[in-house]
Image: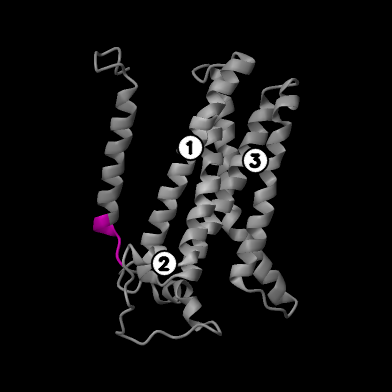
Amino acid sequence: YFKEIGIGNGWEMAFIVIGALGFIWMGMWVFMYTEPAKSKHVNKAELEYIEQDKHEEGVAPVEAGKEEKKMSFLQSFCYKQTWAFAFGKFMTDGVWWFFLFWTPSYLNTQFGIKTSDPKGMALIFTLYAITMLSIYGGKLPTIFINNAMRKGQTFDPYAARMKAMLIFAFLPLVVLLAQPLGRISPWFPVILIGIGAAAHQSWSANIFSTVGDMFPKSSIATITGIGGMAGGLGSMFLQKVA
C-alpha cells in the first residue's frame, strides 16, 4: 500500500509503523502503571497473592522502609549468575529468530507457497497460533510444585523451573522430522516448527523468571537487559552462520 502511494519502497514503513506503536505502548505503560502496593486497581487479595513469596518459609522478611543496596551496571558482571543467564540467552534466542526468519523462505523454496497467498497466510497463522501455547510454559513449574504439595512433599521453585526447562529443551528436536514429513504436506513442517518455537518461548519464559530467584528486585531489569542483549547477539551470529 505505501509503495503504491509513493512512500519509499513500501517495506520500510512496516518498521516505522510498528516502531510508532511501540512508543504508544510505552506511553500507556509510563502513565498507567504503578507499583501494586500503591495501585488503586489492585485490591487486598490480589496484593497478597502478588507478594506471597514474602510469607513463604525460608524467605527473609524485608524491613519496612529499608532500601536495598543497588547494584551498578558494571557490578552486575561480577556475578557468575549474570553470565549463566546471559549465556543461556546467547545460546537459545537464535532458535526463535531462526525459525521466524527462515520459515517464509522455506515455504516458498520447498513448496512454492508465498506468504501473500491464502494458503501461505493460513500456514503462518497456524505457526503463530501454536507458538501461543507457550503462554502455559510458565505454568508447568507450578504444576510440579502443586503435585508435590498434594503428596505432602516440598518442591523448590527453582528446581521446578529447571525441571520444566529440561523438558522444553528436548521438545524442539521434533523439528528434525519437518523435512521428511514435508514430503507429505507442508502442514507437517509448520506444525512441528510451531511446537519447537512454542517450546523455546516456554523455556525462555522460565529462564527470565530465574533472574528474580537470583538477584534483588533493584537489579532484575539490568540483568534481564544484559541477557536480552546477549540473546540478540547470539541471534545475529546464528543468522550470519546460516
In this view, the residue farthest toward the front is 78
Q: Quarter-wise, where is residue 123 in the image? A: top right
User: Which residue in the protein does label 3 denote?
Assistant: 195
Categorize mark 3 by other alpha carbons within 10 Å: few (<14), some (14-19), many (20+): many
Q: Quarter-wise, where is residue 220 in the image? A: bottom left
Cα–Cα span, label 3 and label 2: 36 Å
Residue 94 highlighted magenta (yes or no): no
Residue placed at 54% from the left, 18% from the top?
Answer: 118
User: Which residue in the protein does label 2 denote?
Assistant: 78
User: Which residue in the protein does label 1 denote?
Assistant: 237
Q: Which residues are magenta?
A: 30-34
Residue placed at 30% from the left, 80% from the top?
Answer: 67
Quarter of the image with the N terminus is top left
Residue placed at 55% from the left, 44% from the top?
Answer: 132
Q: Is residue 42 visible?
A: no
| Kind of residue indicated by mark 1 | Phe
Q: Position of residue 22 (x, y in %)?
A: 31, 42
In contact (CB < 8 Å): disc 1 and disc 2: no
Residue 87 to residue 22: above or below: below
